[in-house]
Image: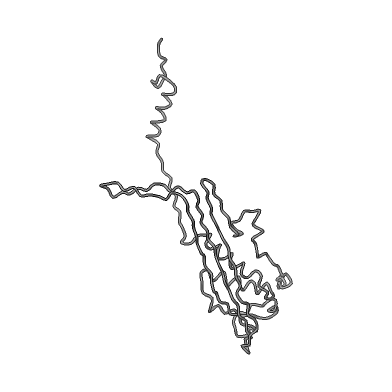
């Protein structure tokens, strides 16, 4: 029996296709690169702090300032992301009906805000076989074995402590002390063998079905305060 001959000189279609693939792999090469950047702070860190600030001011009763012009003094407020926390304080007063004074000259009330805590605690736990270095004699290389985790957990919890003092701008008499306004938020990762999951009360990172449970701020409209629309001449 004679072997069938194919145009490429191979004895079978399989061998012919394999030869073409090898030649193509050697001749056709390519490279795709993509440059990415990593900010110094993660989105989770920032959301933990801002969520804790939202929680701290969510239940503050500030209705006594409705209709009064208020000037805010943040001299004693110093922490990470303080601008968001300051904005949250101003938002809480505005929602309660206070009028935002641009300076302290004509303000009815001065409000001093101070921060007692505004940061994150990180905790981790591990149970399993850690990575073990394996030095190679005569070389500087020291490869390590992979880590085998039976149980692994990582938790980040943010804590916020804010206090407010309000006094009369003219007489300097005391009007209001909030006491500690506390807030916190968490983000945890847990793995047991090959099963892992995340849990958080950050609305922006929670699952869509659970997001509403963690929201403390909602849009508020006071349309009666809108200036009349401009009229054409």
Which residue lies at the image location 49% right of the left edge and 56% below the top edge?
125
Q: Where is residue 133 shown, x and y percent of the image? A: 35, 49
Instruction: Decide if residue 201 is on the left or right side of residue 36.
Output: right
Which residue lies at the image location 50% right of the left edge and 62% below the top edge?
122
Nearer the observer, 78 or 177: 177
Give the position of the C terminus as an image quadrant. bottom right
Nearer the observer, 178 or 149: 149
Instruction: Decide if residue 227 is on the left or right side of residue 157.
Output: right
Nearer the observer, 110 or 100: 110
Instruction: Decide if residue 55 is on the left or right side of residue 9.
Output: right
Which residue lies at the image location 60% right of the left edge and 74% below the top edge?
180
Nearer the observer, 173 or 88: 173
Q: Where is residue 144 shown, x and y percent of the image? A: 37, 48
Q: Where is residue 71 shown, x and y percent of the image? A: 61, 80
Give the position of the N terminus as an image quadrant. top left
Which residue lies at the image location 63% right of the left edge and 90% below the top edge?
171
Instruction: Decide if residue 153 is on the left or right side of residue 99.
Output: left
Q: Which residue lies furthest to the top in this view?
A: 1
């Amino acid at each position: 029996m004679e072997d069938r001959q194919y145009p490429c000189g191979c004895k079978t279609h399989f061998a012919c296709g394999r030869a073409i693939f090898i030649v193509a792999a050697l001749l056709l090469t390519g490279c795709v690169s993509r440059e990415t950047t990593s900010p110094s702070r993660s989105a989770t860190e920032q959301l933990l702090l801002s969520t804790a600030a939202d929680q701290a001011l969510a239940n503050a009763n500030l209705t006594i300032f409705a209709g009064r012009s208020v000037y805010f003094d943040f001299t004693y407020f110093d922490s990470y992301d303080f601008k968001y926390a300051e904005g949250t304080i101003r938002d809480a007063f505005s929602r309660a009906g206070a009028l935002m004074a641009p300076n302290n000259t004509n303000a009815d009330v001065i409000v001093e805000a101070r921060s007692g805590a505004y940061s994150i605690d990180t905790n981790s736990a591990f149970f399993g076989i850690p990575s073990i270095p394996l030095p190679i004699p005569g070389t500087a290389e020291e490869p390590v074995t992979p880590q085998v985790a039976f149980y692994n957990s990582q938790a980040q919890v943010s804590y916020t402590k804010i206090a407010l003092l309000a006094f009369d701008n003219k007489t300097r008499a005391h009007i209001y002390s909030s006491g500690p306004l506390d807030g916190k938020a968490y983000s945890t990762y847990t793995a047991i063998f090959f099963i892992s999951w995340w849990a958080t009360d950050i609305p922006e990172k929670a699952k869509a079905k659970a997001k509403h449970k963690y929201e403390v701020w909602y849009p508020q409209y006071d349309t009666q305060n809108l200036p009349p629309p401009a009229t054409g001449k």
